[in-house]
Amino acid sequence: MGNLRNGIRNTRIWLVVNEKGYGSGFLSSCAIRGLLDHKDTKFPMRNIQGKGDAQDRYWKANLQWLIVILGTWFFVSFGCGILFREWLDENLFRVGTAPFGFWMAQQGSIISFVLLLIAYTKIMNGLDAKFKVDEEDSK
Amino acid sequence: MSQDLWNYIFIGTSFALYIGIAFKQRAGSTKEYYVAGGGVSPFANGMATAADWMSAATFISMAGTLASSGYDGSRFLMGWTGGFVLLTVLMVPFLRKFGKATVPDFIGDRYYSKAARLVAIVCAIFICLTYIMGQMRGVGIVFSQLFGIGIPAGVIIGATIVFFYAGLGGMKGITYTQVAQYCVMAFAYTIPAIFIAIALTGDVVPQLGLIGDFTKGGDPTPFLEKLNKINTDLGFSKYTDGSLSKIDMFCITAALMFGTAGLPHVIVRFFTVKNVKAVRRSACWTLSFIAVIYLTAPTIGAFARVNLIGELHDTSYKDAPAWFQDFEETGQMAWIDKNGDGKIQYFGPGKSESGKDGAVFAGKAPIFAEGVGASGERLLTNDPVSASPNELWFGKDIMVMANPRMAGLPKWVIALLMAGCIAAALSTAAGLLLVLSTSISHDLMKKVVKPDLTDKEEIKWARLASLGALLVAVWFGINPPGTFVAKTVAFAFGLAASSFFPALLLGIFSKGMNKEGAIAGMVTGILFTLGYIIYFTYLGGTKSQYLWGISPEGIGFIGMILNFIVSIVVSRLTPAPPQEIRDLVDRVRHP
């Protein structure tokens, strides 16, 4: 069902694009788009309809949060556990009796990952609700 | 009661439970067969995925790796759990929205090409097969020790059980069986650790042992300091330092992470819940359940190391505890009296910078000779490494099993461990078998060979395919091609990272990615990684020839970067993908 709905939505956008004479612009954007990925927010057809615009803002917000989450992910594992481990072992506080960097590598990163996923779930479900893109419960 | 009786009781009961569940929940339709009808609760799915995730290798040998290599073992802890984070945030919700049941399905549709679909099918089959071989071998080893039968008979018994509930029950049967298996695994892993934690640290929570004090006999000393103290002299690295170079550590961890994020049998798990919201919740549960066991592993490793050194280091062979002789008898521990003082010396791994790698003897495993040495020990034919004062060798797989014996725990705890180990192997093997049979029946037969296949015929093909795959797995489980199986299991991650991960990621996050780019990238990535692995593993490449000091274990990360570069460059030079595909990507991005 979802596919059909989306199909209809896309056809509608396409018709609107043609009526407003964006057809040629659309095609050339198609050719450029291979070079400029992710720049499709500037795509004219997107801004014609409120829905497409909301979808773009949803996707942008999605990407921004993903960058924050993956940044944290990199910092707690590769950063604390590998790249700066020695420095952290020597200079930072101990966790219980364990040196900080070593502890991050063996236990801290895993705890951070669990918290990170919980935060991710909260944020993304929040975004879905805000942009009203909640998937219905039936398939 | 004897140990055997306890083993039979625990394993017999757990088997009755698994088969009972599988029978009750057996699949009736293709949808139930592939994705359990799509209505499993996030909590139950989380538990089942955790069981699927933790293979026999994780369950048995991770703690042993930590015990023998200290900090270096963190690469598995971070690599596998961190990979799960990537899988959850970058892959699963989008693939779920796409709405098809398998990874080759996504690649085939997204890259509008039969060639891409075929490459993906081959990769999926290869990854799953190498994995399942390792599992069958693991099951075989446990069974053979249990019943005193040969490994082949053990492998066949294990395979029959897996076929029964995976082949007949489909995803629905497997999911509910795995819930039970996770419970068995969690108990089996933590209960012995609790006993040991009380004995060594006076603390009930084993996960805290690593950051606590060692209190057994005398004043409390920080646990890790006790572990470090023994090997600071003599150029040995500290337990908290490890011996891998930073770049190698980085690349191996990265290869494990990105490889994990491309594993087809875990991705498919998330098709069994209702919607994207439930997928995210389910992933949280899965990682929490995994964390229960992964947070215990470093402590078990450290406990095992303390016990091992405490009981054996500088102890004369004649006074060594009885379990040492038992493990020596089965070839899982060995001792070479290098300095002829009749005492066992063990310091730990060496520092790679100092040129010592702490190896006891040449070769990977001990080869026992006939006869006994001066103190009554089993003699080895391996050449001793004289530069290293280590005299004790132990197989990494036995640490989890040996720990309760070293700590003198009751017999039922050991029986519980055995049941846990079998649960770990069976749950992973069943999940893999399902993906394999789906790849063949759905992706290959229905999508490529014979599109007019009916539902009923498809399930028949799936069951036939799982039988075929199992026969192959049994054959390789009984006749492992040298060290091939164990190695490819580790390398499978590198191969998954360098082939699947970029194709999936770019397929979702770059609308401009076309079939030419994806296929060129996958082929380059997998050929480069495979070539590097084969050169250094089979064609006699030496450590000094490593590219930037990166071992074959970690080269998948470089292969992945190559894949990304090739994919992007090629896709910019070839025609952009058609409009339907970009609509498809749009649809995948929005629920």
Image (cartoon, rainbow, N blue to C red):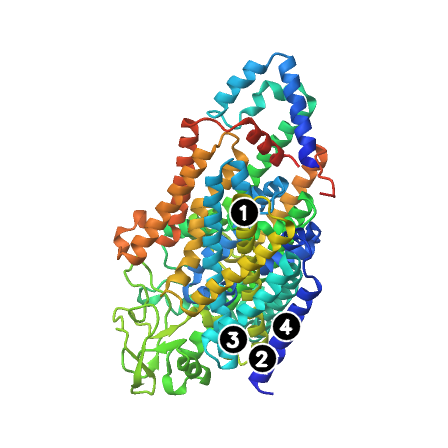
**Quadrant containing the N terminus of chain A in the rendered view:** top right
N-term-proximal mark, 1 vs 3: 3
Q: CA distance from mark 2 to mark 1?
A: 41 Å
Q: CA distance from mark 4 to mark 2?
A: 11 Å
Whole-percent x and y of residue B403? 50, 74
Q: Amino acid at mark 1?
A: Asp
Name the element at disc 4: helix
Whole-percent x and y of residue B191? 61, 72
Residue at which label 1 appears: B443
N-term-proximal mark, 4 vs 3: 4
N-term-proximal mark, 4 vs 2: 2
Pointers 2 and 1 within a single chain: yes
Q: Mark on residue B7?
A: 2
Name the element at disc 3: helix
Q: Is residue B284 left or right of residue B341?
A: right
Chain ID at mark 4: B
Pointers 1 and 3 within a single chain: yes
Pointers 4 and 2 within a single chain: yes
